[in-house]
Structures are given as structure tokens and as C-alpha cells.
């Protein structure tokens, strides 16, 4: 099928490359000329495992352009995957969505296209995009649009770091539209994924237990709400375990054992129950805020979602409080932060806890040394203001911890687990370590001479529970 993708960020690029890899004819449009130039050369603009290889394998089926006039005419499906960053008051900033919809309406010249909101957009945006498409079509063509467009919602659930895997081997595909024809078109487009008819790449095998991918086909508003409800649920699961973690610290319980003990209940599940310094990234903060904002337009208060937000903000503050509690004076100290990206296997820094923590430490008069295996260059570009304030970017984790008064593990990149912590202990000024993700080997670090802290205290691990009857 002929597919256009508007916006080549984390979602648009992954979607475009995967559909092209599956054999569809894809044109990606982005307003950022530098991005388009890089992508046209086959060089990804984001860090995402397997993306470069997929782009190379799909190159005969994908083009990149800044020109809507080149991309839109003749498209059967147009995905809008532009950013919807948080706006004032929690509701998302929809200016990129509006610009994209208007440009599609102006440039389309075929008989029929399905225009798909893949961006996470507030409930009701489908109807709004439909209006924008028809208005701009009329402006450009001088006559009213008559059935040229159907709008659908196809929320995206990929996780950065496993985006290609999540697209090919999705847990589910959700398609919402009030027009049967658009549901049929999208069903055809997604068929190779739904029925898993493609030959999997050797380096990204199909999960053994994956059968057909479930399709949830629904009305527009339900699809839009599904995305927000899913993200808010995941966010509150994390905040729930972090809140329990605060109590665990007070009563002397081990939160990792508590999480294991409750996560083995199939009704609860163990995923998203890792206590630590909380969620980050471009989605959870923005989407919980949007949900609260949408509900307030209808006179509703989202008590649980708001509580999840509060707990998450608090976790970041607790990092600084813990360091303060141990060191008493933070002014003049050097703190090493290991990890900048909001999670491993991505270079995405949006809402990254490391950035918030660095700012709080700078406010307290600390010098902050930072490292990340892939996000350092992006950090230098996007947070250039932090350098003059006292943030020092280091090329290796070893340089970062050298002569530091404390180290905080912020992002659980595997290479940090495998560091030579005995050597690190020798190079630090004070052997204080706050493991913000509960992933390091407490016994080993203690042997190396570290005062080992987690977000939930420094208690000795509780006796390992066993599954023995
Ligand atoms: N990143 C994720 O993990 C993720 C997951 C699920 C859903 N989403 C949602 O998907 C949407 C996109 O997120 P992202 O992370 O890919 O954003 P992003 O910021 O990485 O990419 C957006 C892209 O859109 C381009 N753009 C902006 N206006 C444009 C226009 N008028 N025409 C063409 N291109 C334009 C930008 O230059 C940019 O390249 C958001 O609504 C987000 O909430 C993101």
C-alpha cells in the first residue's frame, strides 16, 4: 500500500521503517531538513536497536522528504506521528498536529485516504482533524470535500529501546474509526503483523509464544482513551511500588522482595513493579497530565492518576534528600550521575530523571559529573545551559566517578552493573553510592567498601524467599 508518515521521530520513523520493511511503499515527511537529510543517507537520527539495519534492508521501499506535495498525493494511508508535547495546564500542545492535518488536506489529490492519528492526542482530536482536513481541502481545491478522508485513531504502544520488536510483535493493534472503510484499509495494511505472515529477521526472532496479534477495532473516542488509560495505568503501577517502597524503608522491609512477592500473583504481574527513582520519558508525564486535564473539562477529578504524579515527583526529590541526609552538606560536593537517558537502550532525554536531579543538585551548590553510553551528545545539545552551571560531561563512567563524593546510578544500563566497582571505590573521594534502580550487587559493593543506599534505605536484603512449598 502507499503510505505516508508525517513526523519521523521515535514513533514515525519506527512505523515508517517497519511498514517499508514489510513491503509497503512508504514516504516519510518531516519539517526538519537536517533529519530528512540524515535519514535519506541511511543514518538514523535516534538511537534505537536494529533501526539502522532495518532502514538498510527497507531502503528500496522508503523515501524521506520535507515536501508534503511529494508525499501526500496518491497516498492510501497517511499516519500523523508528530510530537504532542505538554502544553500549559497539562493539555498537549496540538499545533504540530494541526499543521500536519492542514498540510495533508491541502496536498491530497486522490479519491480516498485514511488519515490516522498515531500521535497520542486528546479525546475528540479525531473529529477535530477531520474538520481541519476538510477545511484545508476546500481552501486548496475550491470545493467542499466529499468523502475524500476518513480519520482513524491507531495509538502507538511501542517502547523506546525495543521499538522495532514492539512494532513487529505487538501485544495488540488498536484501530478506532467511525467509518467501516477505514477499518478495512488499516486491517489490510496491518495484516502481515496481525497474522505474522512475514519471515522474521534472524537477529530479531519472533517470540515463541506469539500467535496472531489481537486487533481491537473500535470507535474513535474509545481508541483515543485506550492510549491514555494504558499509559496512566503503567505510570500508577510504578508509583504504587514506589509508595510501598517508602513504607518498606520505614518498617525495614526489602522492597525488591515485596515486589517479587506481589508480582508473582498473576492478577498483578511483575512488570512495572521495580521500585526506584520513578518514571521519565516523553509519555507518562505528558499523558497523565493530559488525562487529568481532559477529565477536568468534564468536571471529573482523576484522584488515582494525580496521586501517581505526586509520588513520581517526590521520588526525584528524595534522591537529593538522601544524599543530604548522608553528607549533611552538599555545597561544594561532586556528585556523579551514571545514566542520563530516561531508561536504557534509548537516547531520549525528555523528562529524564537525571536532568531533574542534576538541576536540584546544582541548586544545592554541587558540581555534577554525568555519563551516558548513548545520550551524552544529545544531552550536550539539548541541555547546553547546564554546562556553565556546573555539569561536567564525561566520556567514560570511570572518569565520571573519579574523585566524586557520591555516585547515583540513575539509568540501569547493563555496563554500569558490570563496572569494576572495586576500582571505582579506590578512585572516589567518599564511597557513597545510591542505587536509584535497585540493580547493583549490594553484597559486592559493600565488600568493596561502599556505603550502599537504595531509594528504600540501606537495609540488608531480607532472607530470599523461595518457591518451595
Ligand atoms: N516516543 C514514544 O515512545 C512514544 C510512544 C507512543 C506514542 N508516542 C506519541 O507519538 C507522538 C510522536 O512522538 P515521538 O516521540 O515520535 O516525537 P518526536 O518529537 O521524536 O518526533 C516528532 C517529529 O515530528 C516532526 N514534525 C513536527 N511538526 C511536523 C509537521 N507539521 N510536519 C512534519 N513533521 C513534523 C518533528 O520534526 C519530529 O521529527 C507523540 O504524540 C507521542 O506522545 C510516543
Image (cartoon, rainbow, N blue to C red):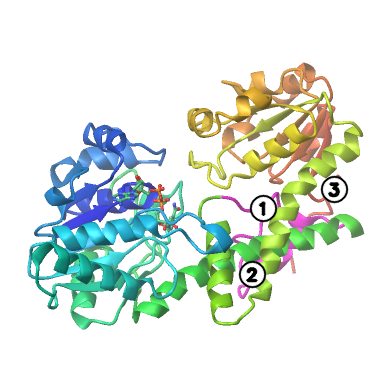
Note whether 442 is above or below 115 in the view shown: above
Q: Main secondary structure of the magenta part?
A: loop
Q: Is residue 269 magenta?
A: yes
> Picture coordinates of residue 373 (x, y %)?
53, 30
How many marks the image carries: the answer is 3
Observer-nearest of 75 and 210: 75
Residue linked to disc 3: 457
Query: Which tag is nearer the camera, tag 3 or tag 2?
Result: 2
Which residue does the numbered mark 1 point to in the structure image? 278
Query: Quadrant of the image for the C terminus?
Result: bottom right
- Residue 361 vs 201, above or below: the answer is above
- Secondary structure state at the residue bearing disc 2: helix
Q: Mark 1 and mark 3 in contact (Cβ < 8 Å)? A: no
Badge 3 element? loop
Residue range highlighted in magenta: 252-280
- Label 1: state its secondary structure: loop
Between disc 2 and disc 1, whose residue precedes?
1
Above or below, 281 against 374 in this view is below
Amino acid at each position: 500500500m502507499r503510505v505516508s508518515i508525517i513526523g519521523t521521530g521515535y514513533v514515525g520513523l519506527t512505523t515508517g521503517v517497519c511498514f517499508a520493511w514489510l513491503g509497503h511503499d512508504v514516504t516519510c515527511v518531516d519539517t526538519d531538513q537536517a533529519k530528512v537529510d540524515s535519514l535519506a543517507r541511511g543514518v538514523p537520527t535516534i538511537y534505537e536497536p536494529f533501526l539502522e539495519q532495518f532502514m538498510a534492508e527497507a531502503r528500496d521501499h522508503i523515501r524521506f522528504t520535507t515536501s508534503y506535495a511529494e508525499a501526500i498525493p496518491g497516498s492510501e494511508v497517511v499516519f500523523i506521528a508528530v510530537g504532542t508535547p505538554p502544553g500549559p495546564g497539562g493539555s498537549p500542545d496540538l499545533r504540530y498536529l494541526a499543521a500536519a492535518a492542514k498540510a495533508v488536506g491541502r496536498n491530497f489529490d486522490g479519491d480516498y485516504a485514511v488519515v490516522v492519528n498515531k500521535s497520542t492526542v486528546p479525546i475528540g482530536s479525531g473529529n477535530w482533524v477531520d474538520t481541519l482536513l476538510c477545511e484545508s481541502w476546500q481552501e486548496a481545491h475550491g470545493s467542499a470535500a466529499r468523502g475524500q478522508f476518513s480519520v482513524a485513531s491507531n495509538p502507538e504502544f511501542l517502547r523506546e529501546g525495543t521499538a522495532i520488536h514492539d512494532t513487529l510483535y505487538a501485544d495488540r493493534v488498536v484501530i478506532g474509526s467511525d467509518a467501516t472503510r477505514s477499518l478495512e484499509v488499516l486491517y489490510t495494511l496491518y495484516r502481515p503483523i496481525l497474522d505474522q505472515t512475514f519471515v522474521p529477521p534472524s537477529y530479531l526472532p519472533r517470540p515463541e509464544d506469539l500467535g496472531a496479534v489481537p486487533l481491537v477495532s473500535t470507535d474513535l473516542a474509545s481508541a483515543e482513551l485506550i492510549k491514555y488509560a494504558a499509559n496512566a495505568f503503567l505510570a500508577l503501577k510504578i508509583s504504587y511500588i514506589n509508595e510501598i517502597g517508602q513504607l518498606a524503608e520505614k518498617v525495614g522491609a526489602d522492597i525488591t522482595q515485596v515486589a517479587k512477592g506481589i508480582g508473582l500473583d498473576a492478577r498483578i504481574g511483575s512488570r512495572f513493579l521495580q521500585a526506584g527513582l520513578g518514571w521519565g520519558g516523553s509519555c507518562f508525564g505528558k499523558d497523565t497530565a493530559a488525562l487529568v486535564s481532559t477529565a477536568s473539562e468534564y468536571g471529573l477529578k482523576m484522584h488515582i492518576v494525580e496521586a501517581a504524579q505526586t509520588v513520581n515527583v517526590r521520588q526525584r526529590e528524595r534522591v537529593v534528600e538522601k544524599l543530604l541526609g548522608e553528607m549533611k552538606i552538599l555545597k561544594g560536593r561532586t556528585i556523579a550521575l551514571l545514566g542520563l537517558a530516561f531508561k536504557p537502550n534509548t537516547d531520549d532525554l525528555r523528562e529524564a530523571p537525571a536532568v531533574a536531579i542534576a538541576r536540584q543538585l546544582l541548586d544545592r551548590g554541587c558540581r555534577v559529573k554525568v555519563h551516558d553510553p548513548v545520550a551524552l551528545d544529545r544531552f550536550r545539545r539539548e541541555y547546553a545551559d547546564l554546562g556553565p552551571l556546573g555539569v561536567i560531561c564525561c566520556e567514560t563512567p570511570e572518569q565520571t566517578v573519579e574523585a566524586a563524593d557520591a555516585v547515583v546510578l540513575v539509568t540501569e544500563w547493563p555496563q554500569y552493573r558490570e563496572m569494576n566497582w572495586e576500582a571505582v571505590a579506590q578512585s572516589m573521594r567518599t564511597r557513597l553510592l545510591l542505587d536509584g534502580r535497585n540493580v547493583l550487587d549490594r553484597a559486592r559493593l559493600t565488600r568493596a567498601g561502599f556505603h550502599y543506599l537504595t531509594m528504600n534505605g540501606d537495609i540488608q536484603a531480607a532472607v530470599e524467599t523461595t518457591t518451595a512449598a
